[in-house]
Amino acid sequence: MATVVRLKWMFLAVAMVAAACGGGSATPSVDSTNPATTSQGNVVSPDGMLTVVPPDGSGAITVAAAGSIEEFDGFGESLRSYELGPDGSTFDTPVELRFQVNADELSRGVLVATRSADGSIEPLDFTVDTSGSPVVVATIDHFTVVELRWDFYRDITVNAPASVAVGDSVPAELQVGYTPEQITAGYSARELFSIREGVDGAWSASGSISGTEPTRFYCASLGSGTVSYSGLVIVEYVGSATSAGGFGPARGVESWTVQGAVQNADASVACVKPATEVPPEDVKCRDTAMGDDAELGECTVTEKVFFDAGDPGAFEVLTNEPLQPGPQGRVVLSLFGLTPEGELVAIECGTEQDCVGFFGAGFVNFTALFPIESSVAEAVWRFSRVPLTVEGINIVLEVPAGETVTGDPVGGPAVLTEATLYISNGEFESITRLSLDAIREALSK
């Protein structure tokens, strides 16, 4: 089967693991240690990796190893380069070039290019014959230096979120993997490339995910699922053609279109219980310096709070305005409960403080024991691994075993009686008591 490529700059890639390969000298030149092969009819290069198939009636043809095309420095690596002769010969019927390649070489993209009579670089249309050992088949209507390049990217993979709530859509996209050298040169910047599926490609989903394409994928049930892509893709690199480390030769076109085949590209997604919005039951504002109540408008308050009843659960807190950096801007989650013995328990965890447990007159630093983790990303504060469960009508907080500073043992279940968020933003602090009914409903789903 042959895959036809007819774009201005084309590559073919197959998602397999490949080993790196070096380039050649800086200017096109015949390698005197590897003399030219001269013949009429089909001609095989001295290294046996290129077969030149001229039209009927052509005269003697020479093929010799050559150095790489220097304008390509920094854009892929030279794989093989040849000087075709007699130099300057032209043909009404194009000459066929058959490059032998292997799966490793194809896995990172290959490019067939030549230098035209005026010295500029031009692409060659090509197909890839995969009916046996892969062969890159290109055509040319004049003789000059031709080059096969590779290693334009590492692979093409599927990017999807690690978890999605049941009933929600599952966004998925293809992404390009880069070498460390390419990342240093700026290849990792998403604005420098775009990638889209080719006409022969196909998305699929399995497990807990249903749908036939990224715009229709969704989590249908609890559990794990997979989104996959197989087939052709098109990647267009857009960069300055004259800047150091740019995409492509130092002169010529400024965008580079890549076409390749992707196999076994997939991503696993966990379909989890949907998060439940937890409304506030009471919101207050206070002046932290004076300890007095203040107008609510002086405080930063919760915009929305969600509880994800996973195993364990997580609170996500969105504020109505950004918080100041450092200790002046912080969010603290406080969970209050009663032990079976009637003892009051309070657990506090915050973005700018450790987790601390208060038990009667004693306390425990739970930094190494309590499972709650706090983080912030894009102004969303998340308290994950919150050990809450439902038993009958009670919400149960599982307190880890520990010992207070006075040597008293603590730990075990406590019935949750209050969940409160403290949001500090400078001299004012808001106190938001959350609805236990909403938390209980989320845990009961």
Image (cartoon, helix red, strand yellow):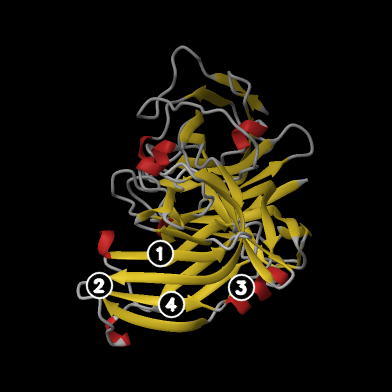
Residue linked to disc 3: 439
Label 2, label 3: how far apart the Cα atoms are: 29 Å
Label 4, label 3: how far apart the Cα atoms are: 14 Å
Is 150 situated left or right of 322 in this image? right
| Secondary structure of the residue carrying numbered label 4 | strand
Do the residues under discs 4 and 1 have CB atoms within 8 angstroms?
no
Label 2, label 1: how far apart the Cα atoms are: 15 Å
| Secondary structure of the residue carrying numbered label 2 | loop
Label 4, label 2: how far apart the Cα atoms are: 15 Å
Q: Earlier in the sequence, mark 4 or mark 2?
A: 2
Q: Residue 230: horizontal and vertical position, in percent?
A: 71, 52
Residue linked to disc 4: 432
Residue 288: give its label.
Answer: 2
Q: Residue at x 38, y 25 (%)?
A: 25
Residue linked to disc 1: 332
CA neighbours of label 1 inside 10 A, class few (<14), some (14 to 19), many (20+): many
Depth check: 312 or 266 in front? 312
Residue type, numbered disc 3 = Ile
Depth check: 178 or 335 in front? 335
Tell me the quadrant of the picture where the N terminus can be found.
top right
Quadrant position of residue 166:
bottom right
Q: Residue 142: horizontal and vertical position, in percent?
A: 51, 41
| Secondary structure of the residue carrying numbered label 3 | helix
CA neighbours of label 2 inside 10 A, class few (<14), some (14 to 19), many (20+): some
